[in-house]
Image (spheres, rainbow, N blue to C red):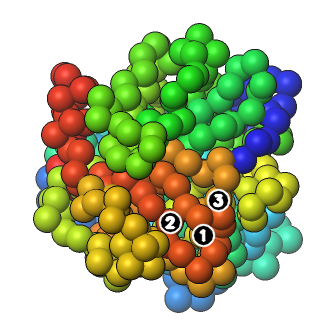
Amino acid sequence: MNVYLSISITIVTVYSVLWSADSLGVFSECDTVRTLQEGEVLYIQSPGYGNYYKPNTNCRWRFNAPTGYNVYMNCYDVILPSSTNCLVDRIEVSLNGNALLAGATRYCGLSTFIVQSTVNKLTVGLRSPKTSSGGRFRCQIVANPPSCDCGRRRTTKIVNGMPTLVNEFPMMAGLVSLSARNVFCGATIISNRHALTAAHCLTGQKITNTALIVGDHDLSTGVDTPYSALIPISTFTIHTGYRPQTSANDIAMVRTRDQIVFNAGIGSVCLPWHWSTTTFDNYLVEAVGWGTMDFGAPASSVLRKVNLNVVNYETCRQMLNSTQITKNQICTYADARDTCQYDSGGPVFYTNPNTGIVYHIGVISYGVACASAYPSVNTRTTSYLNWIKANTAGVKYCER
């Protein structure tokens, strides 16, 4: 999608002012500090859960886990009034356990979300004004031993909308042309220094003119998310077996010059180590990107997702009447839905319905027009796990 970026990309840290009243005892009736033990499962919920909380409810929960552990929180029932930037009723979460919730992420509306602290502390707040119509939430809290954290996403109960939630996919990234100031291909974060993309996206590009945009949602504004960052790239790695004529081995990686700082809006996808023998035939998957919404049509400035079905190898070859499709590729199709121009290099995701973990199973490669009667072809991630590992020496991947 050929979308022009705003003049500058500013990283904004949102400092909550609600805790300035802490010294006045605002939370004295609803202020909890808990120390978590390994394996212990706790639950937090809004006062009177089962019913809506009352107006002017202000609560805070602070959790401490053993050194080296992280605090995992799964908020699986969230019904709060919606507001712009969640400035009214809101849940606030500090992943570094800041007691004043400085820089906390805000949540509101109808949603579920899963987060994990960056240290062994987590602070959660609930704020509502005197005019609140009320709401409710319930979350599970667990102390996780030192481990990797990949594949997390923000989810919603509203399933018909195609634009993603802001920072719904923290692993989503884009390749930016610095001279044209546009996103020309998608990419996916796989470590704090690497992102996967398509080989054809990097062919003919200059490293000095390319950067990786992370943590963004609406490319036309710099205020929709505080996590947006533009990171210089130091290295292109294009698969040596890439063949433009057939799109064989259409996979590549970029290495960033600076470390990608993970937070609530930026993280890595899980690679499908434990799915290496799975064909994903007939699985429901999602393609994500800033691509055009139709062939030759205007581009969308906001990140979009589309649900697709995986088409088996033989059917794909028959539908495309092509013997060049190999088992190193994975085909997707859905009636009147598809990836399109400038989605190339972006991800095909599979979300495990039992765990909510997001896996990268394909790199968007090519298609016949957009939303045509033919499947689109993607590079199959499981065929390139050894290649990825060999070209990211020193990276310890989460094999979950």
Mark 1, residue position:
338
- Is the residue marked by circle 3 packed among few (<14), some (14-19), or many (20+) residues within 10 Å? many
Residue 157 vs residue 284, the one in the foreground: 284
Q: Are marks 1 and 2 in contact (CB under 8 Å)?
A: yes
Based on the displayed image, in which of its 4 quarters is residue 168 positioned? Answer: bottom right
Q: Earlier in the sequence, mark 3 or mark 2?
A: 3
Q: Position of residue 179 (x, y in %)?
A: 75, 18
Mark 3, residue position:
340
Residue 85 sits above or below residue 214 on the image: below
The residue under the point 50% across, 45% down is 345
Mark 2, residue position:
376
Residue 309 sits above or below residue 140 on the image: below
Residue 193 sits above or below residue 362 on the image: above
* Element under disc 2: strand
The residue under the point 46% across, 72% down is 320
The residue under the point 76% across, 69% down is 82
Q: Which tag is nearer the camera, tag 1 or tag 2? A: 2
Residue 350 falls left or right of residue 3: left
Disc 2 residue type? Answer: Ser
Q: Are marks 3 and 1 in contact (CB under 8 Å)?
A: yes
Q: Position of residue 316 (x, y in %)?
A: 38, 75
Based on the displayed image, in which of its 4 quarters is residue 5 positioned? Answer: top right
* Element under disc 1: loop
Disc 1 residue type? Answer: Asp
Alpha-carbon span between mark 3 and mark 1:
6 Å
